[in-house]
């Protein structure tokens, strides 16, 4: 336990330092993007890292679900649950940020753009994942059922991303690091913010897994007390 | 050969049960008709041309009707203890899945085949799928989407039946998983049915077809492997 606490503090320290550096970079150092959208482009430095992180979080759920199905070790189930929860947290922050950006740049709060649509579906899907978890009392059964959705859910995510892009008109990549006009400092700021988000994610994940494990321990102790 | 016979036995059981009670087919059929009446009051079909939204409305009616039937198909397995019998029999778990899924596929398709002409008479002034080059695309789209709906739906309904929330959980879990199928099905049906039969939408429909084929294959294989876990022994 002590080791985990140490790791947690190390990760949060890294997150704070990188986030402060990233914010300074975003607002004071990086140049204004002049070609298309101007100042609001600066959302990119934190928005995209959050998108990547929530994708990674759901991938953690996928890998942990597969690991659970193969080993039937409940430890993996807590990792899967933690991953899905963090994916939702980062996803909701991402959507909130995105909505503010859409309002200021496109003039509307919401558009049925492929990216927004697919992310909304993904949020609903993992919301249902938690409804499923809460509807099963037996912890082994809960882990079994949740693991199947953890696997199928990620396949659905991939299909949703592909199909919404093909079936609706594709919205332009607003800003890409591969653009010739992008200065190195912009890339560096982005990478710093990405590192900060990953550190935050790691710290969160550690806490979540610990909490889930402790809850299970409490349940076991309660049962022993009743007996 | 044995696998085929076992699957057929499970499928036959569902077909006979349905032939004797007509429980699912009748309620699904009434439900799909009711949905169409609701479309009329929602969109004032007398004065609005719904052709452009034809594909979307068709699948709106079909998806909810399908879930009605899917829940039923697993619930009576549970209530009458048939599932325990199936689990005790020396049959591979994925064959139970294939048998149940084929049964649901047949029921959903039957209801839809009756509902499509009625829907067309009600809402579509001049359906483009009367042309021979479009009817095959239209029917193939419907059939492939049904495979996806029956495949994912049977799995989710089984999972849900084993939880506290029972059939409440089926649409909540199933609908987001079926979104790619719905999107593809709507664009195929819409293109072959609708007022804007542009080359672009037909090309889109062909791309949608590829998505459906790919989705069906991936999900059927994945679910056949996972079904044992969902049966919850």
Image (cartoon, helix red, strand yellow):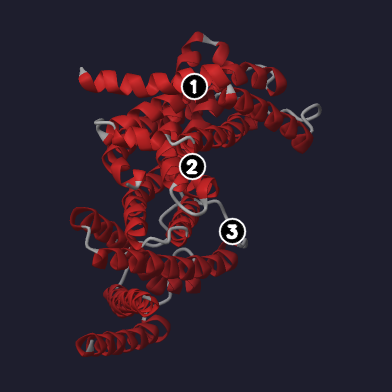
Q: Which mark is residue B17?
A: 1
* Residue nearer the viewer, A84 or B106: B106
Of all chains, the one bearing label 3 is: A
Pick whichever of labels 2 and 3 is earlier in the sequence: 3
Q: Where A34 sits versus B209, above or below?
A: below
Quarter occupied by residue B211? top left
Q: Where B40 sits versus A197, above or below?
A: above
Discs 3, 1 touching: Cβ within 8 Å: no
Q: As drawn, is B139 to the left or to the right of B216?
A: right
At horizontal 43% and vertical 75% (from top left) the residue drawn is A32
> Rounded to the nearest whole Å, what is the CA distance between mark 2 and mark 3?
16 Å
Quarter occupied by residue B147? top left
10 Å neighbourhood of mark 2: few (<14), some, or many (≥20)? some
Q: Position of residue A111 (x, y in %)?
A: 57, 55
At horizontal 42% and vertical 33% (from top left) the residue drawn is B82
* Residue nearer the viewer, B59 or A223: A223
At horizontal 31% and vertical 61% (from top left) the residue drawn is A61
Q: Name the image quarter holding the C terminus of chain A.
A: bottom left
Whether discs 2 and 3 lie on one chain: the answer is yes
Q: Nearer the viewer, mark 3 or mark 1?
A: 1
* Residue at numbered disc 2: A168
Q: As drawn, is A178 to the left or to the right of B183?
A: left
Q: Position of residue A182 (x, y in %)?
A: 32, 68
> Rounded to the nearest whole Å, what is the CA distance between mark 2 and mark 1?
43 Å
């Amino acid at each position: 336990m002590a080791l985990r606490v140490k790791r947690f503090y190390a990760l949060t320290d890294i997150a704070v330092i990188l986030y402060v550096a990233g914010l300074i970079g975003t607002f004071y150092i990086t140049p204004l993007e002049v070609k298309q959208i101007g100042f609001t482009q600066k959302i990119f430095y934190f928005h995209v890292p959050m998108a990547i992180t929530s994708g990674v979080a759901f991938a953690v759920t996928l890998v942990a679900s597969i690991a659970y199905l193969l080993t039937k070790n409940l430890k993996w189930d807590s990792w899967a649950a933690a991953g899905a929860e963090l994916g939702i947290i980062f996803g909701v922050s991402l959507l909130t940020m995105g909505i503010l950006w859409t309002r200021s740049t496109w003039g509307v709060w919401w558009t049925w753009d492929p990216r927004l649509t697919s992310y909304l579906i993904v949020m609903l899907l993992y919301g249902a994942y938690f409804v499923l978890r809460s509807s099963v009392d037996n912890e082994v059964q809960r882990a079994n059922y949740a693991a199947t959705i953890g696997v199928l859910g990620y396949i659905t995510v991939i299909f949703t991303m592909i199909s919404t892009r093909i079936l609706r008109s594709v919205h332009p990549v607003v800003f890409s690091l591969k653009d010739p006009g992008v200065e190195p400092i912009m890339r560096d700021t982005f990478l710093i913010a990405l590192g900060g988000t990953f550190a935050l994610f790691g710290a969160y994940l550690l806490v979540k897994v610990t909490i889930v494990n402790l809850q299970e321990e409490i349940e076991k102790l309660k049962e022993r007390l009743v007996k | 050969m044995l696998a085929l016979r076992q699957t057929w036995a499970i499928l036959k059981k569902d077909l006979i049960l349905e032939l004797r009670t007509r429980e699912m087919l009748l309620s699904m059929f009434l439900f799909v008709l009711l949905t169409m009446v609701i479309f009329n009051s929602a969109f004032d079909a007398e004065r609005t041309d719904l052709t452009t939204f034809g594909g979307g409305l068709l699948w709106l009616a079909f998806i909810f009707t399908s879930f009605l039937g899917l829940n039923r198909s697993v619930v009576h397995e549970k209530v009458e203890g048939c599932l325990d019998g199936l689990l005790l029999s020396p049959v591979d778990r994925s064959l139970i899945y294939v048998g149940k899924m084929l049964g649901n596929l047949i029921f959903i398709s039957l209801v839809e085949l009756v509902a499509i002409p009625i829907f067309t008479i009600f809402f579509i002034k001049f359906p483009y799928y009367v042309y021979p080059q479009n009817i095959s695309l239209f029917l193939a789209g419907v059939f492939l989407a049904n495979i996806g709906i029956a495949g994912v739906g049977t799995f989710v309904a089984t999972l849900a039946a084993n939880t506290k929330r029972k059939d409440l959980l089926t649409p909540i879990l199933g609908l987001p998983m079926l979104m790619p199928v719905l999107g593809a099905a709507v664009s195929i049906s819409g293109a072959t049915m609708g007022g804007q039969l542009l080359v672009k939408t037909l090309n889109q429909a062909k791309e949608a077809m590829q998505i459906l084929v790919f989705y069906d294959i991936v999900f059927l294989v994945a679910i056949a492997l996972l079904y044992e876990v969902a049966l919850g022994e």
